[in-house]
Every structure is written in C-alpha cells, then in structure tokens.
Amino acid sequence: MKFEQAVKKSIKDFLAGKVPANLMRQSEDGLIYTPEYLDKIEEQMLDAPADTKKKNKKETVDEV
Amino acid sequence: MKFSAPIPGANFTTDTRNYGWHRPPEITNFDDGVEYLIRKMDDPDQSDLIFSLIEMKTPITVIVSTLMLQAISRGKIPIDLGILMSGPVARYIEILAKSEGLPYEMGADDKDRLSITPTALKVALGIIDSEDELPPEEVLALSGSKSEGGLMTRPDGTTAAPAEEQEAMLGMAVEEPVEVTEEEMVDGLA
C-alpha cells in the first residue's frame, strides 16, 4: 500500500466515524479531535455570520 | 540479483543528520499534531493556497497527502502519525471549504477514479495535440481498454470452445471413418 492510499483509507474511515481503537487508548483523557468534535466545530463555523467566521475559526482552535 | 541496491553498511558512510526525517520527530502526540496542522492552515498564506487548490477541484485527499508529506519531510511528525492524522485534517479542510461556500471534492471514493498516466498528462497539458500522434500501446493505455484475444490471454468465460470442440480435444468425439482411395494407397506406398 502506498502512502497516498493509506491516507485515503484513513480519511475514508474517519469520515465514516471510525477512530482506531489503539489510538483512543493512547490518551487517558480521550482524544480531542474526534469525528464528533469536528462536527461541533462545523456547526459553530457554519452557523456563524460570514464576517465573524474567520474570527470564530481561530477562537475554536485556541480553545483547544 | 539486485545491483542497484546499496551495499550493506552504506548508511554508515554518509552523514544523515541533515535530513529532518532521520531525527526523532518533534510531535508524537495525535492531538498536538492535528492542532499543529490546523494552526498552519489558519495562516493566511496557507489557507489561500488551500482554497486555491480546492477551487481547482483538487481532491482534499491529495491536499492532505501533500500537507502530511511536507510535515514528515521537515521532521515534524512521524509517517504513521501522519496517516492517523489525515482523517481530522481532511475533515477540517472540508469544514473550511463549506464555510467559504466552495464546492469541493473529497476524493476518498474510488469510483469514477481516473488513472493518471504520463500519456494522459501529456495530452492534458497540451504537450501532445491528439492521441493520433501516440504509438498504439500508449493510445491503448490512455483509453483504458483491455486487449482482447492473444494466446496467453486468460479466458473470460465467453471465449470457451464449444462443447463439440472440447470433446474432440479430449478424444471423446466419434471420428468419422476416412475413405482411402486406391490412388492414395499407391502414392503412400511410393
């Protein structure tokens, strides 16, 4: 398997809501960047008015 | 025999410390890695580049691969972490595209996939005007059609010989007696 194919497979799995089990076990507090967390970011960014989108985007990342 | 391979111990003869990927990576944590790339994408220069690529209908998977290779070559992240991080980074780029109202292509599906060959690129870039200038084998590769027939071609089920012919090949067919004339017998003896 080539690197690009592995990346594509990883993206496909993540979009399907799958996160590798061993990766989840890596962190005691749990991972931050899970599919659910990114869904929340999407909601926040898409709900925000156009002029504040960029500002909110940075704030969202800073919160982390 | 492989003559192009390096000789055993060749790696000890060169100084490899100049390459980023030969040193331990700076980031080994999943969340730290994703955050690093998200912050990098928030940089105006990087985000403009990403939006331009999306507008050019570059699949997000290709953009992510490029970002990962860049980070790996600079010694920021290890290769395996790069593969694991691809999912959240691609999702974030998708969110950015949606928030900017840009039509995007994820590229994670294999259907409708076009294989990029050197010949296809030459035609697309206008280096070759038409397929007529190409040798037949390259035209065949460009069209993606398979060659049919040939002695060593694997049968696909439709090219099987009829039952009678198969029986004849196996020696199971009833052979019709061949009448031999007197002249033929004489010639055969001569």
Image (cartoon, coloured by chain):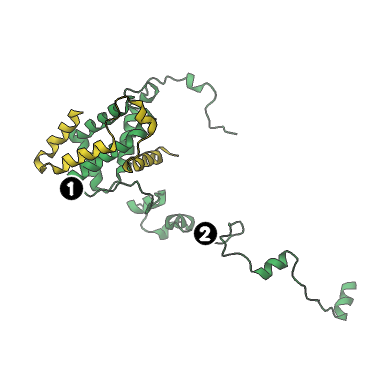
| x 57%, y 62%: residue | B157
Does B126 appear above or below A44? below
Q: Residue beneath label 2, please?
A: B147
Q: Amino acid at mark 1?
A: Gly
Q: Quadrant of residue A30?
A: top left
- In the image, taking residue B21 as reference, residue B40 lies left or right, namely left
Q: Decide which of A24, B190 is in the foreground and name it.
A: A24
Residue B127 falls left or right of residue B148: left
From the rendered image, report the letter of the chain displayed in green.
B
Give the residue at the far bottom of this rendering: B182
Indicate the chain coloured yellow by its letter. Answer: A
Tell whether B42 sits left or right of A29.
left
x, y percent for residue B150:
59, 60
- Please tell me how crowded label 1 is: few (under 14), some (14-19), or many (20+) other residues with Cα within 10 Å: few
Residue B131 screen position, x and y as percent: 40, 59
Task: Please name the residue shown 43% across and 39% down the image.
Answer: A2
Q: Is residue B161 left or right of residue B82?
A: right
Q: In the rendered view, would you say B175 is above or below B138?
A: below
Mark 1 or 2: in front is 1
Residue B101 is labelled as: 1
How many labels sit on residues?
2
- Which is more toward the observer, B29 or B71? B29
